[in-house]
Amino acid sequence: MAIHLLADEVASQIAAGEVVERPASVVKELLENALDAGASQVSIQIEGAGKRLIEVADNGCGIPADELALAVARHATSKLTDAGDLFRIRTLGFRGEALASIGSVAVLTLTSLAAGAGAQTGARLRVEGGRTGFVEPSGGPNGTVIRVEDLFYNVPARLKFLKQDSTERQQIETLVARYALAYPAVRIRLVVDGRLSLQTDGSGDRRGILAGIYGLEIARQMLEVLADEDDLRLTGFISPTSLTRSNRKEITFFVNGRWVTDVALTTALLQAYHTLLMVGRYPMAALFLELPPEEVDVNVHPAKAEVRFRSPDRMFSGVQRAVRRALLAYTPIPQVYAPGTWGSPSSGHEIDPAWTLAHPQMAGHVTEAEPHAEAGLELPALPEGDQPPLPVGKLPLLRPIGQVGATYLVAEGPDGLYLIDQHAAHERVLFERLLAQREKHIPAQALLEPAVIQLAPQSAELLAGQIPILERLGFQVEPFGPGAFLVRAIPALILGSDPAAAVRVVVEDFEEDETPLQEEIEARIIARVCKRAAVKAGHVLDPEEQRALLRDLEACQSPRTCPHGRPTMIHLSVDLLERQFGRKGAR
Ligand code: ADP
Ligand code: MG
């Protein structure tokens, strides 16, 4: 075939593919246009998962009749004139592509009345599969209504790539919810197949919107983030450590009002939660970064879902610090110490969010994570507003008293009584030691007799893929026939535990839709191995072993939770005991 220029329609369809991937992308572009137009009210209607109809009506500045035809032309925009403007962008759109793209793969109808058009009526324009009609006069209120019907009717291949209706609908709902949170001062309404799906009141109250999206209980628990550093401003919400998800889908970042996906920002967030969350659990977050436009390159991809920062490191540490601070700041009620024989707090008590945050029942929270029977013992409920003081910081020196039920250690500290779950505590000790050793090199201990493990084909494949990681962690594993592996060495630290079982946990229930970062895989594996190797409940410990476990726990960074986020101990403070025995605080 000789080289020839593509027909306009074909070229448009090709280009449209980059902007309009699915119904949710149409909603995004139209919603962004409405926001750019300064609308204080946007109403969105969806039918047939957005394939039959997407209609976005706003009360923004509108499009003058004589500009309507331009609005649907490719590379026509009112938001940018020269390339230099690209670094001064304060609008969400700037490429002048969305309407043209949508018009080339659907039936698009624009009806608009520009503000200040006076008695003049508005105008309407229809574009069908890339063919633009004539501008006709039309009535209507100030603002713009854009209807998109029969999306992809002329690109059947695209239609086939769409997911089930429920998934496409969900994507739209999620998208609108995110924007509603990002623009609390705009009244946003989403109606799906005639049913009201979301509505905000434009009052600017983000927590109210959170409640609309996630329900009251979650909205109440979310922690507020607020940081101002030079010209970087960060606001939004993060979940306390008691509120987690099994994936990263509820982590959202907006940069200068634009929803972006950014691996580095997500990593910064996750690092702020480091060791505070159960391995394999993720926080929820909606964070809004604002910085001077010249600090961000928004022109990375046609869908504008990615950005580049001029100083990525600064963004990273800014997010990490602000989130960490929000987590730490969440310290309900300072410690109250009773005078007397129990002594006063030793200095060097820092706030340990692991404790303050990971104890839902003490902070008056409802956990969303599965309740763990191991955490069992419930503290007696105190009247609202009079919760027991929360112990903070690393552990004080503990005096072992004994073991109960071959499961818990009892110890006395300067500030009360401690009940320690021996299994969880040992898990924590092993976990931190392995992590510390990993910094350099985890010593491996060769087994006198290599162990053989046999796995189902799928697990075998998983394990084969993890061998290099295992090696870094002190395991020496090699393939040994179909589905079989030979374990030659294990980390010296867990010597004495069953080597085959330790390796087996590596391939247990890895979530398939996740591709965790290398770092996370390792932490997850370490946590599992430790769980496996830790001393079990029901195991009698002699006094020397009890003492050793307490000493080791005292040396931990986050002694109060196991690597999976469950408490290692319950602290009955002097204050609590005195209240419970009616020695104090009678009201
Ligand atoms: P971009 O948003 O990148 O400029 P679009 O194709 O999305 O490109 O829109 C083209 C132009 O049409 C915009 O620059 C704007 O002037 C106008 N426009 C689109 N939607 C609206 C709206 N809802 N209200 C007012 N003007 C709009
Ligand atoms: Mg646009």
Image (cartoon, helix red, strand yellow):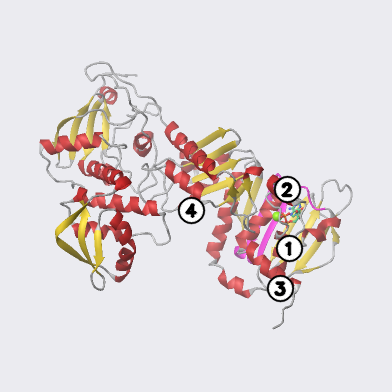
Helix, strand or loop status at disc 4: helix
Ligand number 1: quarter of image: bottom right
Image-based side of 63 in relation to 539, left or right: right
Residue reaching furthest to the bottom: 1
Find numbered disc 3 in the image and state the secondary structure of the residue it sits on. helix
Q: Mark 2 or mark 1, which is nearer to you?
A: 2
| x, y percent for residue 305 | 60, 54
Determine if the magenta segment contains residue 61. Answer: yes
Inspect this view and state whether residue 257 appears.
no
Q: Which residue is mark 4?
A: 249
Q: Nearer the viewer, residue 152 or 376?
A: 152
Residue receiving disc 1: 100
* Residue that label 2 marks: 85
How far is disc 2 from disc 1 in space, using C-alphas?
Answer: 21 Å
- Circle 2 crowding by C-alpha within 10 Å: few under 14, some 14–19, many from 20: some
Q: Residues within 10 Å of mark 3 (few under 14, many from 20)?
A: few
- Are circles 2 and 1 on residues that touch, CB within 8 Å? no
- Numbered label tally: 4
| 229 up-or-down from 88: above or below | above
Of marks 1 and 3, the one in the foreground: 3
Residue 280 left/right relative to 490: right
Q: Earlier in the sequence, mark 2 or mark 1?
A: 2
Mark 4 close to ligand 2, CB under 8 Å? no
- What residue does disc 3 label? 10
Q: Magenta part of the protein: which range? A: 35-63
The correct choice, above or below, for 68 with respect to 35 in the image is: below
Residue 45: x, y in percent? 66, 57
Is the Cβ of the residue at disc 1 closer than 8 Å to that at disc 3? no
Q: Earlier in the sequence, mark 2 or mark 3?
A: 3
Q: Amino acid at mark 4?
A: Lys
